[in-house]
């Protein structure tokens, strides 16, 4: 009686992928997302072997948006946005910093103040160092706004502010009774609407500019897709940029001889860092 023996020669090892922790973890199909709405640590415990996607991540870094200007002010510029695909990671801890939104431009009697610049976000570790610039604040009739990842909109006949190359676009210029919209990641602000943001791999849009404010005789601007706040007319207070999107705040409406909160801009939305990789 003869035996039949089967010998497996050179059997392939099963594929393995990145294993990591940090932030809020969600899955979609074969991919895992780590969303950081606050500063923290992305820890890679293993990078995997045998696949083109082993040890490879995609990520987006979004800075905080700028605040809108007060008193028919310009919309705040979106926080700078950088999206990276196909980056290699090592077994290491990566430091994630998430920036806050800029302060709203106040109503200072019959003038108004410019919106504040947002704070940058970053991710740093072995082989990766990516940072962004906070969004520019919108201008008010009597106070300057700022440049930023995307620039804040102008007010009272002034030009908008510039964006940072690779991160965003410029704010819109102003004429008459409307403020310019803040710039967005995908395009510049206009008068009075904010520029649009970028739709990323998690089906969320980031980096929309805030809409410009106006007087009672004009229409205020709409915030851009990606969290931009709407501008307001008359005594209205600009809408804040959406948290976790880097959206710019909307410009406040014109106020006739009134004080206090009326006519203030909206605050900028906070930023985020999101990381994606194949996990199975």
Image (cartoon, helix red, strand yellow):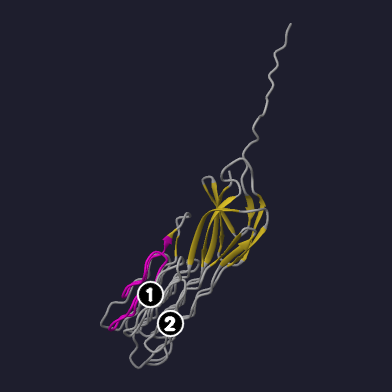
Q: Does 18 sit above or below residue 110?
A: above
User: Hey, which quadrant is residue 207 in on the image?
Assistant: bottom left
In the rendered image, residue 146, in percent from the top left (x then y), is placed at 45, 80
Which residue lies at the image location 68% right of the left edge and 24% below the top edge?
8
Q: Does 70 sit above or below residue 199?
A: below
Q: Which residue is mark 2?
A: 145
In the rendered image, residue 75, in percent from the top left (x then y), is placed at 39, 76
Q: Tag 2, which secondary structure?
A: loop
Q: Earlier in the sequence, mark 2 or mark 1?
A: 2
Q: Which residue is mark 1?
A: 171
Q: Quadrant of the N terminus?
A: top right
Outermost left residue: 217
**Badge 2 vs badge 1, beta-carbon distance below 8 Å:** yes
In the rendered image, residue 268, in percent from the top left (x then y), is placed at 47, 74
Please rate how many residues cluster around mark 2, counting C-alpha atoms within 10 Å: few if below 14, some from 14 to 19, many from 20. Answer: many
Please give the range of residues in magenta. Answer: 172-198
Q: Is residue 104 left or right of residue 214?
A: right
| Between 128 and 135, the one nearer to me in the picture | 128
The residues tagged by marks 2 and 1 sit, at their Cα atoms, a distance apart of: 10 Å
């Amino acid at each position: 009686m003869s035996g039949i023996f089967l010998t497996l020669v050179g059997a392939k090892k099963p594929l393995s992928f990145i294993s990591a922790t940090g932030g809020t973890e969600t899955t979609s199909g074969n991919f895992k997302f780590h969303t950081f709405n606050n500063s923290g640590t992305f820890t890679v415990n293993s990078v995997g072997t045998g696949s083109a996607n082993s040890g490879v991540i995609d990520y987006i870094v979004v800075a905080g948006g700028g605040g809108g200007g007060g008193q028919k002010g310009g919309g705040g510029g979106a926080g700078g946005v950088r999206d990276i695909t196909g980056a290699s990671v090592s077994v290491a801890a990566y430091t994630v910093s998430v920036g806050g939104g800029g302060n709203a431009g106040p109503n200072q009697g019959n003038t108004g103040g410019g919106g504040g610049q947002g704070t940058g976000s970053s991710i740093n570790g072995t082989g990766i160092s990516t940072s962004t610039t906070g969004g520019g604040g919108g201008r008010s009739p009597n106070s300057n706004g700022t440049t930023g990842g995307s620039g804040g909109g102008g007010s009272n006949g002034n030009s908008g502010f510039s964006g940072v190359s690779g991160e965003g676009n410029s704010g819109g210029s102003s004429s008459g009774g409307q403020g310019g919209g803040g710039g967005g990641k995908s395009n510049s602000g206009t008068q009075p609407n904010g520029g649009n943001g970028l739709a990323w791999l998690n089906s969320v849009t980031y980096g929309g500019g805030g809409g410009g404010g106006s007087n009672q005789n004009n229409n205020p601007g709409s915030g851009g897709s990606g969290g931009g706040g709407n501008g307001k007319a008359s005594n209205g207070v600009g809408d804040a940029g959406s948290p976790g999107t880097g959206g710019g705040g909307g410009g406040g409406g014109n106020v006739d001889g009134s004080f206090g909160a009326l006519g203030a801009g909206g605050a900028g939305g906070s930023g985020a860092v999101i990381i994606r990789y194949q996990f199975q």
